Amino acid sequence: MEQQTKHVIIVGGSLGGLFAGVALKQEGFDTTILERNPTNLLENQGAGIVAGGDTLAFFERYDRCKRAVAVASQKRMYLDKSGDVVHEEVMKQTMTSWDLCYYMLRANYDHQQSDYCKAPGPQPGDGKIDYRYGCTVAGFAYEGDKVRVSYDKAGGGKESVVGDMLVGADGPSSTIRKILYPDIERKYAGYCVIRGTVPEEAASEEAKAAFVERFTFFHSPGIQNLTYTIPGTNGAMEEGKRLLNFVWYTNFPEGEQELEEVMTDKDGKRRRLTIPPGQMRDEAWEMVKKRGRDRLPPQMSEMVEKTRNPFVQCITDVITPKNSFDHGKVVLIGDALAGFRPHTVASTSQAAFDVLMLIHYLKTGNHAEFVRRTMEYARLIQHRGVYIGNRSQFESLQLKDYIEDRNMMSIVREDLEFPEWTQVRV
Ligand SMILES: Cc1cc2nc3c(=O)[nH]c(=O)nc-3n(C[C@H](O)[C@H](O)[C@H](O)COP(=O)(O)OP(=O)(O)OC[C@H]3O[C@@H](n4cnc5c(N)ncnc54)[C@H](O)[C@@H]3O)c2cc1C
């Protein structure tokens, strides 16, 4: 099938879909990206991303903007409740931001100009591109060797597009997955993550000492907080211009009033899984800030008090049993394949890895290797995310156990061992 593949339809125009679009274009494939967002650009998520090995490898290979994508942290630290450092180790790690990755990928895909980077022009050999927003994919059907993808237009009406292959990069609540596996659902794990950023220059000296170029943790029963430095406005990397990004996991058991409070937005609507930036109710935010003052080290509570763009995500679990259908005519990548818990810091890297493997498959015809390696990785990391997440939130461990769990997630993909139960026979 790979020999005939010329036009690839990608569902989802966030990082996973754009990784696919950029790589396929540069490898000479024609692509159409269908994104449901009603406007051309996605909202800035205002969030940090740990730039794992495959994310960096992707930019190394396919980025033509030639700007830095990540800032480095030099040390990993653990704080106690009073804010004292109780453990530290020298460990270099690289951090980026959702918006910087997004704008670099849009520059590389459809030459979107922005203050993040100068968009490179087309090059000989590139495939044709077509980014369509306001297109909510509702279904697909095989037509001989082709696949027809149908979608609803934001302004009303239905349309469809025909290609040789469909890549589902439509995230953890994937429509493509729902069509293939109607019974699989994302399950709430019993806790949320409160996230936000604070400009480096707005932080106290104590907070800067804890978070600037550091990867800093705090654990206590029902709580994990991780704070680190990420690029600033328009991807600024200079000292003083970056952002401090906090990721605070805190338990909100299903059915309890506090979960209802935190997940009800400014318009009084109970959101299922996310309260985006700007949508938190003042009362809910006051409740969260008080929780921070009571339960976090002072430097971390300061971040919660000072952020202007908090948002909340419910932590969920989901994984698809298979990622390739009709011998590779339809594939799932990134969060559509497996929604990892963020403790794994591997979701973006998964999407990048899936795309690197997809390109390998389309160039070599080795479908079995694509399926085997992407599925094994998804199964292992999804399982580990559940394991370390539950230990962090629902057990009371010694510091050394938290450190051990964290270090397990830092093993580079190439050194991972895949137990029997992760393995796939194709
Ligand atoms: C706020 C935030 C913080 C994050 N932090 C981290 C982090 O620290 N580390 C990390 O590794 N990862 C992080 N991630 C996750 C990371 O961004 C994703 O794993 C990565 O973008 C790959 O996701 P994806 O593109 O597969 O799915 P998503 O990012 O969920 O994108 C799916 C896209 O598909 C579109 N879509 C959905 N359904 C349809 C449909 N029917 N038709 C058309 N379009 C559709 C959606 O609008 C969306 O744009 C974060 C994500 C967010 C949002």
Image: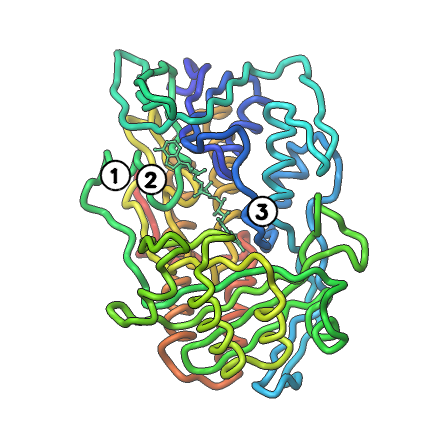
Tell me, yes or no, whether the two marked residues, 3 and 2, touch with CB atoms within 8 Å.
no
Residue named by callout 2: 174
Residue named by callout 1: 178
Tell me, yes or no, whether the two marked residues, 2 and 1, touch with CB atoms within 8 Å.
yes
Q: Is residue 138 left or right of residue 351?
A: left
Give the Cα distance between marks 2 and 1. Answer: 6 Å
The residue type indicated by label 3 comes to Trp
Q: Residue at x 68, y 75 (%)?
A: 89
Q: Residue at x 42, y 36 (%)?
A: 169
The residue type indicated by label 1 comes to Lys
Give the Cα distance between marks 3 and 2. Answer: 20 Å
Figure check: 48 above or below 106: below
Local crowd size for mark 3, using a 10 Å CA cut-off: few (<14), some (14–19), many (≥20): many
> Residue 245, how many percent across, how many down?
61, 61
* Mark 1: secondary structure: helix
Q: Is residue 169 left or right of residue 352?
A: left
Residue named by callout 3: 98
The disc, 3 or 1, on the residue closer to the chain's N-terminal end is 3
**Does the closest atom of ligand 1 sit within 8 Å of the Cβ of label 2?**
yes
Figure check: 375 above or below 112: below
Figure check: 377 above or below 32: below
Give the Cα distance between marks 3 and 1. Answer: 26 Å
* Image quadrant where one finds the C terminus: top left
Q: Within the image, what quadrant is residue 94 found in?
A: bottom right
* Image quadrant where one finds the N terminus: top left
**Does the closest atom of ligand 1 sit within 8 Å of the Cβ of label 3?**
yes
The residue type indicated by label 2 comes to Ser
